[in-house]
Image: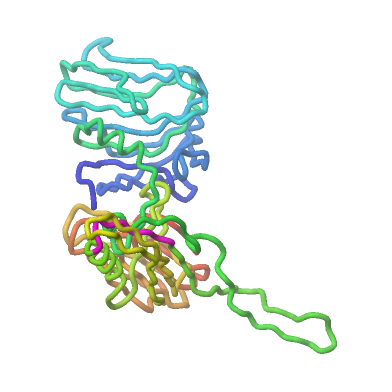
Amino acid sequence: MVDKNLILYLPFDDPDGSKAYDYSAGRHDATLSGGAMFTKQAKAGKALDLCGGEVNTEQNIPFTGDFTVSLYVQIQQRRLGWLLNLPGIEQHKEQWVDVVPGEWYFISFVRSGSTFKVFLNADCTYVGNLAANPTGLALCTEELLTTTAKLDEVRVFNVAKTEKEILKMQANNDVEYYVDGHNFKDYGVYVSASDGLVGRLAQKESLSVDYDNYHGVVRDRKRKRFKERTISLKCFIEASSRSAFVEWLNRFLALFDGDHTRRLTVEYDGKAKPLVYEVDLLDDVAVDKKWGSYNEELMVGTFTLKLTEDEPVKKVLRHISNNNNSKATITVSTYKYLNIYWGDGTHTFNVGGNDTTVEHTYALPGEYDIIVTGVIEDIEKFETNAIMVWELLK
């Protein structure tokens, strides 16, 4: 679901380079310059290390109306400040707070009508009135000539978020599991442990020659290929009664029925870089349970989902739009066929050739994660108008 009020979202989890993808529907991607770079010393995934440089985007804060700006910040000084410029000579509001050097802080600026609030972590640290529209907003440190601050998860909204919504953005640390966009938790299902989501895939048997007058074997170690991925999710399900237990379990397992593969998505560290898989549920599901003494008694059952991903080596892209009939395009040069799963339940198989362009139209607005599978290592050219989430995931 696209948040139409989110007008800029820079998680800074991008491939190293000079572009920071905007994960909002506006796609106002930012450019790094002057020494700014991505760092793995982050609150989530990667972060932006300014290193005396800057990052620029065409999206502005909508100062003429309500807005919310939120981000994580880390500095190496003991004082963090902010400055809100207002029309007129020396008209501004500011605040300085004591912080612990090297720690991450979640700061939010919220304008609602004539009221301006600032939140630092869970605390509201400032409330003031605005007599006019602001003209600028800045975070400040006590460094004079440059800044060594790190930023992460920068979001700008064109509405005033509530305190509850701000706390939810900060505190959302659960690992979330989805199948075709349905959260496991919506069916009373929770994952207690997982196996096979990450790690090295088993290698296919390669060509080998066993000479009788040599020790050992001679093995072809070029162009390694890998077997399918097996994922095991240890789950438990809670229901308020016996009948609800059976109903909810059947509804959940039915999500894995139907033709084609199912999309498994795991959000483990924010929403910008999920783990995504095209899977099948090939095995049976045996549920370990004990019937409640009474029909209205809470029932809990445990089971393991054993999922198979036939095409485990892939690129992952994201297409975001607020409009109907938006288009994603991919241009490739490859002599080995690729399969593309568009994230809306459709696919395009056997894509190959020289400068081949494939276009897909999404009937409805939304966020769609695109999976491109095949011998990714042998792709000679790859261009797309979508966000590159994972250049290579296996």
Which span of residues is magenta-colored? 234-242
Residue 71 location, x and y as percent? 36, 34
Can you name the residue that lies furthest to the right here? 213
Residue 309, x across and y down, in percent: 43, 71
Q: Quadrant of residue 201?
A: bottom right
Query: Magenta segment: does it hold 241?
Result: yes
Is the residue 330 above or below the residue 53 in the image?
A: below
Residue 130 percent across, percent down from the top left: 18, 17
Q: Residue at x 24, y 27 (%)?
A: 110
Q: Is residue 388 left or right of residue 165?
A: right
Q: Taking 61 as reference, is 243 above or below it? A: below
Residue at image point 37% right, 24% down:
139
Picture residue at 22% right of the left edge, 16% below the top: 128
> How are the residues colored?
rainbow
Please indicate, yes or no, whether residue 184 appears anywhere in the rendered image.
no
Q: Specify whether residue 331 is painted magenta.
A: no
- Identify the residue shown where x is 38% and y is 15%: 96
Between 238 and 212, the one nearer to me in the picture: 238
Up the image or down, 227 lies above or below 96; here it is below
